[in-house]
Amino acid sequence: MSRHDTSFGPSALLTPANALTLARLLATPLMVALVITTGPSSWLLVGLWFVCSSSDFFDGVIARRHGTTRSGAFLDPLADKCVVLGVLASLAAIGEVGWLPVLLIAAREVSMSFFRSYAGRRGVSVPARRTAKFKTLLQDMVIGLAFLPPVGLHHANIVRWALWVVVAVTLWTGLEYLRDSRKLLAGAQAPTHDGVSHHAA
């Protein structure tokens, strides 16, 4: 099969990458239910979390191979946030971590989603920094630690302190995103020499 036969346009919805992303999104209720009923830690949760978090890497690889889409650009970060926030909230519900760090992470993620939508309506797309990708990796690692029986069952304080490190990195990346967005939005609205504003593509 040629590359042309397996590629998708920017407006495509039914793509392999989107299917993997939707599977990750639909797995969130299952992960939450398992944490609450069998948590905080088990090898089953470790295995499921590894599959769930690693699928984020693979759907990116598939998307680059077959063509990125606008729907994928929307669904992928949405799935990431739903999975991470859902699992962190379930860990807080059973007392494994505190609610304050979870709420701070949630506030950052939700506010950035609204701001991204605001910028997008003005024709501005802000690329993700490497620190944002590092933030996602740290979030996945802390959840993995909480699920790991030798750590989660016997060294809960390690998980709690590690989560605060994640909070600091998460809030820092949010400030970076806001700073970059403000610069791009200002550039998009800057008047040209003929007095007409120009917008970023």
Image: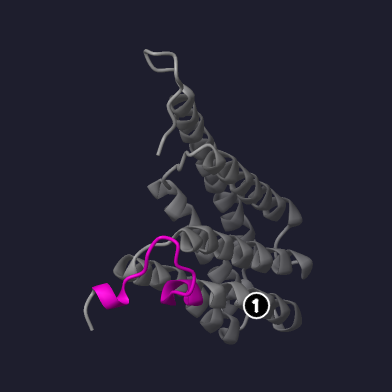
Q: Nearer the viewer, residue 173 or 153?
A: 173
Q: How is the image coloured?
A: one colour
The answer to whether residue 91 is visible is: yes
Residue 97 appears left or right of 63: right
Please tell me how many numbered marks the rendered image carries. Answer: 1
Q: Position of residue 185 (x, y in %)?
A: 49, 30
Q: Position of residue 52 (x, y in %)?
A: 52, 76
The quadrant in which residue 48 appears is bottom right
Asked if residue 17 is among those painted magenta in the image, a careful observer would answer: yes
Q: Looking at the picture, which amino acid does disc 1 mark?
A: Met
For the N terminus, the image quarter is bottom left
The answer to whether residue 50 is visible is: no
Residue 138 appears left or right of 33: left
User: Which residue is situated farthest in the bottom direction here?
Assistant: 44
Q: Position of residue 26 (x, y in %)?
A: 62, 76
- Return the residue at label 1: 31
Q: Is residue 49 above or below residue 166?
A: below
The quadrant in which residue 144 appears is bottom right
State the extent of the magenta-drawn residues as a range.
4-20
Q: Residue at x 43, y 72 (%)?
A: 17
Q: Position of residue 84 (x, y in %)?
A: 60, 64
The kind of secondary structure element at disc 1 is helix
Q: Residue at x 55, y 48 (%)?
A: 170
Q: Is residue 56 above or below residue 43?
A: above
Asked if residue 50 is among those painted magenta in the image, a careful observer would answer: no
Q: Residue at x 30, y 70 (%)?
A: 65
Q: Nearer the viewer, residue 201 or 26?
A: 201
User: Which residue is situated farthest in the left direction here?
Assistant: 2
Residue 124 appears left or right of 112: left
Around disc 1, counting alpha carbons within 10 Å, would you say few (fewer than 14), some (14 to 19), or many (20 or more)?
some
For the C terminus, the image quarter is top left
